[in-house]
Image: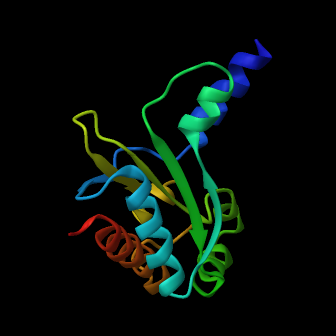
Amino acid sequence: MLKTAIAALALTAMPAFAETVTKPSAHSVADTVDRLVAAVEGAGATVMARVPHSQGAASVDLELPESELVIFGNPRVGTLIMQQDLRAGVILPLRVLVHADGEGGAAVTYQTAESLFDGLDVDVTSEAAQRINGALGNLTDAATSE
């Protein structure tokens, strides 16, 4: 009973996935990840981690399509969001999943600020939230374009 209540509470506290953006990439998964990392660093943000989901699955004899999560941020923007609602620290830094698209290509997927901060006391029309949307759009464009 307690586990069910905790699971239900956790699900209601999670950001909605209705506002995700997926963009096809002109490059392989590995090249798209490298291009995304270069774009993030070139923009003055910091890559905190690269999580190779498919390699993790393989390490326990399971399979996933090729996929890697890139976690990155810029405290000049993230701090402004967390000043609005400290609970945003559960969501930040930002994440972009680079993954196989199921058709032999690659794609990137991320959540918009509106989706990320849904249910929090964050003004998604604020300059900081709009900077997050702009950065996610621009960085993923740089990673996926020809």
Among the 4 quarters of the image, the one containing residue 10: top right
**For residue 49, side relative to residue 29 (left or right):** right
Please identify the quadrant where the N terminus is shown: top right
Taking 67 as reference, is 134 left or right? left
Where, quadrant-wise, is the C terminus in this rendering? bottom left
Q: Position of residue 61 (x, y in %)?
A: 63, 18
Between 132 and 43, which is closer to the camera in this rendering?
Answer: 43
Residue shown at 48%/86% (left/top)? Answer: 43
How far across and down, in percent of the image, does residue 83 sit?
67, 79
Between 130 and 74, the one lying in front of the other is 74
Vertical arrangement, residue 21 with respect to residue 121, above or below: above
Residue 26: where, in percent of width, then height? 23, 59
Does the image show residue 120?
no
Q: Quadrant of residue 112?
A: bottom left
Residue 129 is situated, as x and y percent measured from the top left of the image, at 46, 76
Residue 26 seen by the camera: yes
- Direction from residue 139 to residue 49 in the image, left or right: right
Residue at image x 27%, y 33%? 102
